[in-house]
Image (cartoon, rainbow, N blue to C red):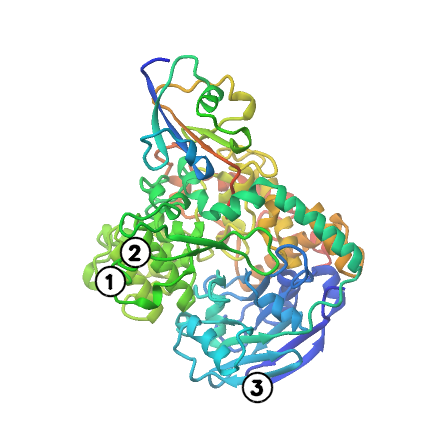
Amino acid sequence: MAWTRQILRVDLTKGTCTSEALNMEWAMDYLGSRGLATKYLVEEIDPKVDPLSADNKLIMATGPMTGTIASTGGRYTVVTKGPLTGAIACSNSGGYFGAEMKFAGWDMVIFEGKSSKPVYLMIENDKVELRDASHLWGTSTWHTEEQIKKENQDPQIRISSIGKAGENQVLFSCVVNDLHRAAGRSGVGAVMGSKNLKAVAIRGTKGIGNVANPAEFQKVTTEKKQILAENAVTGEGLPTYGTQVLMNVINEMGALPTRNFKDVKFESANDISAEAMATPRETDGKAQLVTNQACFGCTIACGRISKIDKDHFSVQQKPQYHGASGGLEYEAAWALGAANGVKDLEALQYAQMVCNEHGFDPISFGATVGAVMEMYENGTLDEKKIGLKAPFGSAEALCELVEMTANGEGFGVEIGLGSKRLCEKYGQPELSMSVKGQEFPAYDPRGIQGMGLTYATSNRGACHLRSYTVASETLGIPVKTDPLVTEGKPGLVMAFQDATAAFDASGLCIFTSFAWGLGDIQPQIDAACEGDWSEEKLQEVGERIWNMEKLFNLEAGLTKEDDQLPTRLTTEAATEGPAKGLVAGVPEMLPEYYEIRGWDKDGVPSAEKRKSLGL
Amino acid sequence: MGSATATLKLYASLSEFLPPGSVKNEAEIKVGEADSVARVIERYDLPERLVHLVLIDGVYIEPEDRPIRILGPGEVLAIWPPVAGG
């Protein structure tokens, strides 16, 4: 078995920490991480609970592969009911925190209730205690990590924490670990903040001694690492260029949402691309990109570490930002850049650093700023209301607004509510580019049709990481499909959704799926875990997880109306590029998607489907 | 080769194969009536293993079509090695 079989339950109201046995019956049906934590959540909370109330729970969970020698086995997941969406929130992260949780002997930690004062949880193997965090409250994730390590005199403690955004309950705030990695989407950090839980610090020294078949596991993980190494994408493309290499690809395809999705191409895409990050700056002769970085156990190493130009206006008087720090990934660079028409790469890096430092999602933040800029340009908002001029393309506005949002100041408080609430408040709900209240990532569904259905049906709100059909529609992985057509996309989306859920439940990184299929993770899981783990079983686990999340959302009050795109994308055609004249074909794809899912016309899983999945 | 021109864009590790004078990953190149995509790829010595994603005006060109698809005047040919993101 690769589970520790122990979970930790922390009652923040009572201040108690108790261990209990992992429900192994559930582990056999939901595997771990996203799947198993969501099972615990849906069994333990009322789906209609106020996400920011003490009655909501927040679960941090590893998968059976987390902490093992399998490549990328370092993921952990934060699961809760999301404040941004009112739906299931499930956000995973790399770095080293997840593996440390496993080394300390815990499969997951369940937080319930609400502390009367700021606390952090300290875990040293079996020794677990809640400690006062009053001195950390109001400080950044970076300060919190440094301070906890310092006061415990141990630089090897791994920490997940919230920054000021989570404390202030910015609805898209993150839980940040290892300085630059984050459970980034759906506002899981706001739930943590609502519980007065500042951080979780872990030191684990038990290691992983519980693999079912160690010799077979060693053999098969080595073989599978070789596949990653020899694959052109995972062995060369991702480590060298990172995800940011997509900026020019997606722009060239005419699917780069620009200026709040008014346009599908950004004339300055190359200025904010991976190629630009690697090009020496005119100002100081240095490239922004310093190096790549790997998470625990990862043999891909797609992460970016960058240095900002210290003479850039955003950081001239702020030496704390001059060192190497987490750099721009594609989604963030798009949201902070093209979505707002901002082409200043250094401004984007500054905004990214502030998002990491104070713990909020650059995708939702950047996309919300895009809506603000559109409302500024159409006269709905003005300089007096916002506190500054905010036309499309203003790097100065981006940098000021990121600070205001981080600090909960002025108009930043309204941005912290996300684009849906903000646009509704100012009478223009149609300008929120979101589904279920969560902002879109970096692919225009008019130019990549499968992504429209992906966004519409994603259980955690608009998201690319629930079924990344871009791999097929753009990159030809595993097979090339035409991005401009809707035919066949419901089946493609469903296949990606179920497979992704299985990957997520294992504790492995979804980026391995550029080279691996379920057939590659299956023998690794089978060697590590007790039980018989066939490929068919993993597919069923993925489908079960997807349906469980959907049922939770329905019980929370969501309906098929929450599976729709904003009218801009279904009525305003792309004006240039290959998709010129096309709108997003979600209305024609959705009925077929429901049907092949075994759901009724309202998107409700049938009794037969629920029974077949044991739901 | 005629006097008509098209645009060649090379990205990621293919950037080093851009002709002198290229700006921001793109160059204006002369194209003739017989200049297929494959011929342009050959002319600029692009290694086969690095020619993965090939677009003309944003539309994907299948590998089997590259020898027969002529790059027309004013068109934009963009090429990437195997890359991915997310």
Instruction: Pinpoint the chain carrying mark 3.
Output: A
Q: Residues within 10 Å of mark 2 (few under 14, many from 20)?
A: many
Considering only vertical position in the picture, is A561 above or below A192? Answer: above
For mark 2, give the secondary structure: helix
Looking at the rendered structure, the secondary structure element under dot 3 is loop
- Residue B64 coordinates in the image, percent (x, y): 56, 22
Label 2 with label 1: CB-CB less than 8 Å? yes
Name the N-terminal-most of marks 3 and 1: 3
Q: CA distance from mark 2 to mark 3?
A: 42 Å
What residue did someone put label 2 on? A372
> Residue farthest to the front?
A285
Image position, residue A377 (x, y; %): 23, 50
Mark 2 or mark 1, which has the lower sequence index? 2
- Asked if residue A253 shows in the view, the reply is no
User: Label 3 sits on what residue type?
Assistant: Gly
Q: Amino acid at mark 1?
A: Ile
Q: Secondary structure at mark 1?
A: helix
Give the mark, 2 or 3, whose residue is nearer the N terminus: 3
Q: Which residue is mark 1?
A: A386
